[in-house]
């Protein structure tokens, strides 16, 4: 990784970048979209009924370009409607809704047939985990799913790239594979993605990756002017997507609908009949290196809003309005690059804390956020902050990290 520049060097560049985002990023992105012919735009996707399907890397699974996230799942009638309208991939985890997410999926499999719905679920590496604990977790998931196998078995939230080739992880995967418990291997990644994704691709062991990718990542490679070298400290998502594509590793995008708060009425960011959420989803689906956007559709309104973008391109005006939203809010958005946490002298889990705050503020997952925060040792929380400012010095985005982790401690520790 290149040496990070000092705060005084970085701040003017950040401000220039944010001012130019409507011009450089917008123009480059629009030009890129225009240069594709109609055939080229559609060659990476297959339409069947109302839905488009894309290939999930070397798994060769053709999955719906909008998939259903299971944390939490909606009511059964909404799930059934989503599948009837073409959604064929559901993402879950043993930890979602105390296992009830997997139990619901088990009912879906009985209703629609095992071959008509692809299931991905995950295991954690927490506490004194071992090869045996991984195998036990996967077997528990299979019991709740009421099926003999899962289509994709993922490690949940990998933050340490060394875990990907740890003999305990590989040993568990190999035993489960021999027993026919899963078809393909994968992982999800919330932080330290520049190291985790690169290792996952380079080691050649993993078939797919679920990665946070949303419109706030327009900062990466879409500005017409080079503001300064290595703007993201080598954590650029777009480079990782290209790397994965080069090795035929499938990528599903998550954490797509990012706003300052939970889903709400953001009329001032509407473009005609297109909501800000629809514009965000369209922007992600423009990327041909993405197989699917994994999102939660918890209400009938959200179902209609999200599935309403299928087959629709982002217009010039929608793109401009979307980029304006990012320009106004980007400095308050944590990209989970992990630079702050890696450089904190007190070893505070800053990136994790900011993620839990997002669960609390943006998704109303209050209990989940508090439980996750409570698992941290006191020395890893905001109370251990020495106010040295190192986290903010290395942050490529100028986030007010010290202020935000204190806000998190206030709401999550009560």
Image (cartoon, helix red, strand yellow):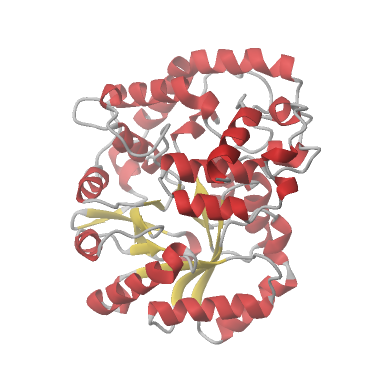
Q: Is residue 307 visible?
A: yes
10 lies above or below 357? above
Which quarter of the rendering shows the C terminus? Answer: top right
350 lies above or below 292? above
Say how many tags the image has. 0
In this view, the residue farthest toward the front is 414
Q: Quadrant of residue 227?
A: top right
Residue in the image at 65% along x and 46% along y: 192
In this view, the residue farthest toward the right is 345
Residue 53: percent from the left, percent from the top? 32, 56
Residue 67: percent from the left, percent from the top? 35, 56
Q: Quadrant of residue 235?
A: top right
Which quarter of the rendering shows the N terminus? Answer: top right
Residue 344: percent from the left, percent from the top? 76, 37
**Left/right of residue 395 with respect to residue 113 in the rendered view:** right
Q: Quadrant of residue 179?
A: bottom right
268 lies above or below 211? above
Residue in the image at 35% along x and 52% along y: 296
219 lies above or below 111? above
Q: Is residue 239 visible?
A: no
Residue in the image at 44% along x and 75% along y: 150
Residue 122: percent from the left, percent from the top? 51, 66
209 or 313, which lies in front? 209
381 or 170, which lies in front? 381
């Amino acid at each position: 990784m290149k040496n990070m520049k000092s705060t005084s060097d970085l701040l003017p560049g950040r401000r220039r970048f944010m001012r130019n985002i409507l011009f450089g990023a917008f123009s480059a992105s629009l030009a890129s979209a225009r240069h594709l012919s109609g055939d080229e735009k559609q060659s990476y996707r297959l339409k069947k009924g109302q839905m488009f399907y894309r290939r999930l890397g070397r798994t060769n699974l053709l999955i719906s370009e909008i998939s259903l996230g299971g944390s939490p799942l909606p009511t059964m009638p909404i799930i059934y409607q989503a599948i009837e309208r073409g959604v064929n991939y559901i993402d879950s985890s043993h930890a979602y809704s105390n296992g009830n997410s997997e139990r619901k999926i088990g009912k879906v499999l009985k209703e629609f047939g095992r071959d008509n719905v692809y299931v991905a679920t995950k295991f954690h590496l927490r506490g004194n985990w071992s090869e045996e604990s991984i195998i036990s977790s996967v077997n528990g998931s299979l019991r709740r799913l009421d099926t003999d196998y899962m289509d994709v078995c993922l490690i949940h939230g990998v933050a340490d790239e060394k875990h990907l080739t740890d003999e305990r992880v590989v040993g568990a995967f190999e035993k489960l594979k021999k027993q026919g418990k899963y078809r393909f291997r994968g992982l999800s990644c919330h932080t330290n993605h520049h190291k985790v994704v690169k290792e996952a691709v380079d080691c050649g062991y993993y078939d797919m990756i679920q990665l946070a990718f949303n419109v706030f990542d327009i900062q990466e490679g879409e500005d017409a002017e080079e503001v300064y070298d290595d703007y993201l400290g080598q954590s650029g998502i777009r480079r990782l997507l290209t790397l994965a594509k080069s090795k035929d590793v499938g990528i599903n995008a998550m954490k797509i609908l990012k706003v300052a708060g939970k889903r709400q009425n953001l009329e001032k960011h509407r473009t005609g009949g297109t909501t800000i959420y629809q514009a965000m989803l369209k922007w992600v689906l423009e990327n041909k290196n993405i197989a699917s956007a994994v999102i939660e559709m918890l209400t009938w309104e959200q179902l209609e809003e999200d599935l309403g973008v299928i087959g629709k391109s982002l217009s010039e005006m929608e793109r401009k309005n979307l980029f304006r939203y990012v320009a106004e809010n980007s400095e308050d958005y944590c990209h989970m690059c992990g630079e702050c946490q890696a450089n904190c002298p007190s070893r505070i889990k800053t990136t994790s804390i900011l993620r839990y705050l997002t669960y609390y503020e943006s998704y109303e997952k209050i209990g989940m956020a508090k439980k996750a925060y409570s698992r941290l040792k006191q020395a890893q929380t905001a109370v251990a902050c020495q106010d040295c400012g190192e986290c903010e010095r290395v942050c490529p985005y100028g986030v007010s990290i010290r202020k935000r982790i204190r806000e998190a401690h206030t709401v999550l520790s009560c």
